[in-house]
Image (cartoon, grey):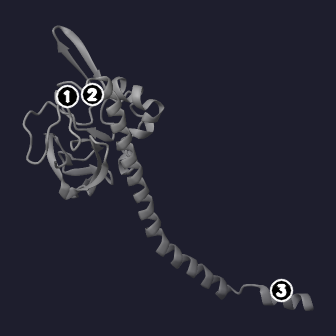
Amino acid sequence: MYKNNIKNKTAFTLIELLVVISIIAILMSIMMPALGKARESAKKIQCRANVHQIQIACDMYATANKGKFPYRGAKANVPHLMHTTDTIGGQTITYSMDDMLFKPYLADMRDKVMFCPGKLMKYYYPNVNPNYVVKYISYQYFNLELYAADRPGIKRLASSQTIKGNDATWGCLTFIDANGKASSHDMVQEANALPFGMNSVLADGSANWYKWDAMGEFIRTGNTFYWPKQ
């Protein structure tokens, strides 16, 4: 009899159990948005670290190449095209960022470093195109010579220039396609939306988050690409 009384006193009633479950549910509803924000913040930090590492690789390349950054060829008509061929003097010349930059200076890190950890990762995935040719790179390179005219507030970086410390060099792939769908660090193919922003690194190695109002349109090739105003 004594043991049964102890058991009855220590057991949860159904109502008490429901109260505990309700409290846990309330706490979870409070914590989940905060956890989501913390995850997104961590991805932005990792993304900034990525573009900073790519810039370090470019600096190493420039040290070995008279201060010039990698050149993707005159036919590099979009900022995420990393492999082109051209015919010069009857010879076919190949410009491969993987061969020039990624393999020598990023080595085994390139499958991690060259892909934005934000929502772009769902769309641009490293295993789809291991040769880093086009589309599946989720960072854009601002060294682009095809369009000779600078757009307002945006400076074109050409391989013939020695890039200055305050010139933007790499950043999250950020564009609005011909159907009006936006893609950037935190969105992929979203209609009736504008990108929130992008991580970008300057030639001096400083990497920062640039909000939409600090970005400008640079080229239109069906898609309209954006990167930081300078």
Dot 2 alpha-carbon crowd within 10 angstroms: few under 14, some 14 to 19, many 20 or more: many
Residue 42, horizontal then vertical, whole percent:
43, 56
| Picture residue at 19% right of the left edge, 47% below the top | 226
Whether label 2 touches label 3, CB < 8 Å: no
Q: Is 222 located above or below residue 27 in the figure?
A: above
Using the image, tell me which numbered label, if any, was put on residue 7: 3
Circle 3: residue type? Lys
Query: If the image is split into quadrants, where does the N terminus sit?
Result: bottom right
Which residue is identified by label 2? 70
Residue 32 drawn above or below residue 108 = below
The disc at residue 41 is none
Q: Is residue 21 above or below residue 185?
A: below
Q: 172 or 25, which is in the foreground?
A: 172
The residue that mark 1 highlights is 159
Circle 3 Cα neighbour tier, 10 Å, few/some/many (<14 / 14–19 / ≥20): few
What is the secondary structure assignment of the residue under circle 2?
loop
What residue is drawn where x is 14% and y is 47%?
217
Please report the residue visible at 52 percent of the width from the left and 73 percent of the height from the top.
Answer: 28
Using the rendered image of the protein, determine whether residue 127 is visible from the camera's viewpoint.
Answer: no
Q: For the point 21% across and 9% down, which residue is it? A: 91
The foreground one among 138 and 189 is 138
In the picture shown, does residue 175 fall above or below 62? below
Q: Are marks 1 and 2 in contact (CB under 8 Å)?
A: yes
